[in-house]
Image (cartoon, grey):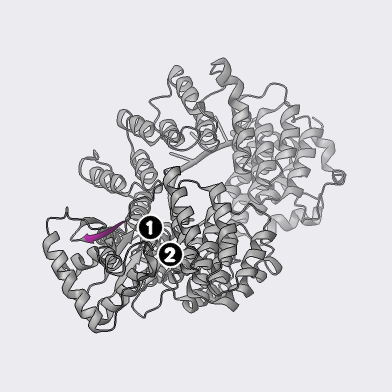
DNA sequence: ATAGGGTTAG
């Protein structure tokens, strides 16, 4: 109908909102000839040769084909040619044209198409154009415009609602997305839910903290018989484990009763891995490989299981998985490759991480970040900064995450000036506002370097609320530099944030003790006692021949404990001959010196090291995981052990890495 | 003739 009149006069610009952009559909005969003859896209020429201008379907097919071949601009140009050549082509070609505008994130083109849809009467009555239009606005990050258009659609069908809901998800408006399904959940009527809608609804419920949403949706899909649809149930599985329920058990229950496909296995493994249940993740992985019912492992499974290895420090399993990666030819894959890098770094093998990093074909921002973090964790600050420089040279723009890696590397290596430089460059040059993570690194870096006032000033200037890690960093800096006043302030704040961790009080009482403030030491000890706050028991883990051995302080439950203790005795003698003096400063102050020394020598990391030295292959790296920070005496002890035995020892606590080979360790004095 | 769709990486 009205489409014919649109052909001749150039489209008036939509009011105000249009941004300058190579508008693809100006009706200029010259341009039209260009579209059909220029060799800018040989593909385009190919498609256009096949177009029968008299058949509308022929045009829309050409637009859609160009789009799916990846040339959105050519698709838009062809759409413009279509409308001029045959006005009847508008109806079928408009939706793919809108998708092309979305793919090119060209809001200007999208708005012109919107106008065209309005003038031709296709909007809001044609549901095909309507859903594509919403899709376009969301893709161009204009959810408000999408909403405006959505509100004009009289009776939106499931496809339109799904387009709207998934668009909200894309723009991180999770509650808005869920809101579109809410009435339906409330009335228990599944009128609008089909497979695609259910997928979006569950993925929305995985991102909000509202309780019970997943279960209600679950009831709904059972009612309409979607509970045997693997895709839908997989998303449901995910939302049980995340979202408001956060219940891995519930997810596992779904997993056990459903008809599982690869994605189900991968999701469950990934969920375990992400929640730190490494043993469960690894167990489920081997179950999949053995009794998975013909399920083959793929890139996603390997990524997930590598994360579990990284978390558990399971280097041997990690190597096996890496071999599998190589066998499957997935070394060049960004996802898998980045996971391998992360696994090797967290398991203490930076050189292996670096080799794996070089194998990745198209490194993305997270691959680079993983490598920077890897060097940083090991105290190799200069290497980390070199990788960062390489990343910038490769043309990638550092983001929020990149700067966490960079600043963490500076803080761990004690690169004060570099840290200061990149912290300010981050804001000034890259326009990134620092978040808690960046502040955490800076407070740690400044604090260790003794710039306590600067660190405190930084906290006071923060635009976001400081978390326990930040005050904790300041507190341990106070221990190093003996600042009672700031320590008290930090503990006060920590107490408001985390009342259950007595570690902070132990640290404060040690600070008092070192300042000779015995009354305060007593006061804190009483406080800890009366409040019933307990320090979680410290333990150290060591992996040997695929088995993990766990040690607590003074542990005598290990079958080899007698040998371990006598080996440790001999080791300590040799260490003392080499100049090791037990650092009793980190032990509670009401013990006498002798008691302090015997308390120190049975620390879990020492037991673990002795056990590993007795049993491992000469020359291999000893890798220990500790659930808490390492005390200053164990820190020193490891250096001496390295010196006498020439063995590389790596201790990783839950967050951090301490690398003793070259005596480099920037860990503070903890407890 | 044309529309909407998650699980992996710091």
**The furthest residue to the front:** A519
Distance between the Cα atoms at labels 2 and 1? 10 Å
Q: In which quarter of the image is residue A157?
A: top right
> Which one is nearer the viewer's eye here, A359 or A602?
A602
State the predominant SS element of the stretch in magenta: strand
> Which one is nearer the viewer's eye here, A503 or A558?
A503
Chain letter of mark 2 equals A
Where residue A517 sits: x, y (%)? 50, 64
The answer to whether residue A241 is above or below residue A598 is above
A274 left or right, relative to A474: left
Where residue A310 sits: x, y (%)? 35, 58
Where residue A474 sits: x, y (%)? 55, 63
Residue at image position (34%, 52%) is A308
Q: In which quarter of the image is the C terminus of chain A?
A: bottom left
- Res. A40 visible in picture: no
Badge number at residue A670:
2
Residue at image position (26%, 57%) is A553
Q: In which quarter of the image is the N terminus of chain A?
A: top right
Circles 2, 1 touching at the beta carbon (< 8 Å) = yes
A106 left or right, relative to A250: right
Badge number at residue A628:
1
Q: In which quarter of the image is residue A42?
A: bottom right
SS class, disc 1: loop
Residues drawn in magenta: A539-543
Q: Which of marks 2 and 1 is nearer the N terminus?
A: 1
Q: In which quarter of the image is residue A350?
A: bottom left
The answer to whether residue A88 is above or below residue A310 is above
Chain letter of mark 1 equals A
């Amino acid at each position: 109908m009205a489409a014919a009149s649109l052909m001749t006069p150039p489209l008036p610009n939509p009011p105000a909102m249009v941004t300058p952009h190579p508008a693809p559909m100006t009706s200029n005969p010259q341009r039209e000839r260009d579209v059909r003859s220029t060799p800018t896209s040989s593909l385009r020429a190919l498609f256009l040769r096949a177009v029968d201008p008299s058949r509308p379907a022929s045009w829309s097919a050409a637009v859609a084909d160009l789009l799916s071949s990846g040339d959105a601009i050519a698709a838009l140009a062809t759409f413009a040619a279509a409308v001029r050549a045959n006005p009847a082509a508008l109806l079928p070609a408009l939706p793919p044209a809108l998708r092309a505008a979305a793919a090119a994130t060209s809001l200007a083109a999208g708005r012109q198409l919107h106008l065209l849809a309005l003038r031709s009467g296709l909007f809001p009555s044609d549901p095909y154009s309507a859903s594509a239009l919403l899709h376009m606005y969301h893709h161009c990050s204009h959810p408000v415009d999408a909403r405006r258009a959505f509100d004009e659609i009289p009776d939106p069908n499931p496809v339109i609602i799904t387009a709207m809901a998934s668009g909200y998800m894309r723009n991180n408006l999770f509650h808005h997305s869920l809101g579109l399904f809410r009435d339906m959940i409330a009335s228990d009527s599944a009128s609008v839910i089909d497979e695609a809608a259910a997928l979006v609804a569950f993925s929305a419920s995985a991102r909000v903290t509202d309780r019970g949403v997943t279960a209600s949706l679950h009831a709904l899909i059972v009612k309409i018989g979607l509970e045997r649809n693997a895709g839908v149930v997989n998303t449901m599985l995910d939302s049980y484990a995340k979202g408001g329920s956060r219940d891995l058990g519930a997810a596992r229950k779904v997993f056990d009763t459903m008809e599982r496909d690869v994605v189900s296995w991968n999701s469950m493994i990934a969920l375990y891995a992400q929640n730190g249940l490494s043993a469960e993740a690894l167990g489920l992985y081997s179950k999949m490989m053995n009794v998975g019912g013909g399920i083959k492992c793929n890139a996603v499974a390997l990524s997930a299981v590598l994360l579990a290895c990284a978390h558990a420090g399971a280097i041997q399993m990690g190597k096996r998985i890496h071999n599998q990666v190589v066998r499957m030819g997935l070394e060049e894959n960004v996802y898998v490759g980045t996971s391998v890098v992360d696994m090797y770094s967290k398991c203490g093998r930076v050189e292996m991480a670096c080799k794996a990093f070089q194998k990745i074909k198209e490194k993305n921002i997270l691959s680079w970040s993983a490598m920077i973090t890897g060097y940083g964790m090991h105290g190799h600050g200069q290497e980390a900064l070199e990788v960062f420089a390489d990343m910038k040279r490769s043309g990638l723009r550092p983001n929020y995450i990149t700067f966490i890696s960079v600043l963490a590397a500076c803080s761990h290596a004690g690169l004060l000036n570099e840290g200061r430089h990149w912290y300010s460059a981050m804001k000034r040059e890259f326009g990134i506002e620092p978040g808690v993570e960046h502040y955490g690194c800076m407070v740690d870096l400044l604090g260790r370097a003794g710039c306590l006032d600067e660190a405190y000033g930084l906290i006071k200037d923060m635009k976001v609320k400081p978390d326990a890690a930040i005050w904790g960093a300041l507190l341990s800096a106070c221990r190093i530099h003996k600042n009672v006043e700031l320590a008290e302030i930090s503990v006060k704040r920590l107490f408001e944030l985390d009342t259950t961790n007595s570690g902070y009080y132990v640290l404060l009482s040690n600070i008092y003790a070192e300042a000779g403030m015995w009354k305060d030491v007593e006061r804190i000890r009483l406080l800890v006692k009366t409040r019933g706050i307990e320090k979680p028991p410290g333990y150290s883990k060591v992996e040997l021949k695929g088995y993990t051995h766990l040690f607590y302080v003074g542990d005598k439950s290990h079958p080899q404990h007698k040998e371990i203790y006598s080996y440790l005795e001999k080791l300590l003698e040799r260490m003392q001959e080499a100049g090791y003096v037990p650092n009793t400063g980190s032990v509670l102050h009401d013990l006498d010196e002798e008691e302090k020394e015997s308390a120190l020598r049975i620390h879990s990391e020492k037991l673990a090291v002795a056990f590993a030295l007795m049993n491992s292959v000469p020359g291999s790296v000893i890798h220990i995981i500790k659930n808490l920070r390492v005390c200053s005496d164990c820190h020193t002890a490891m250096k001496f052990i390295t010196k006498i035995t020439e063995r590389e020892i790596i201790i990783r606590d839950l967050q951090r890495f301490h690398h003793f080979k070259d005596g480099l360790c920037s860990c503070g004095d903890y407890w």
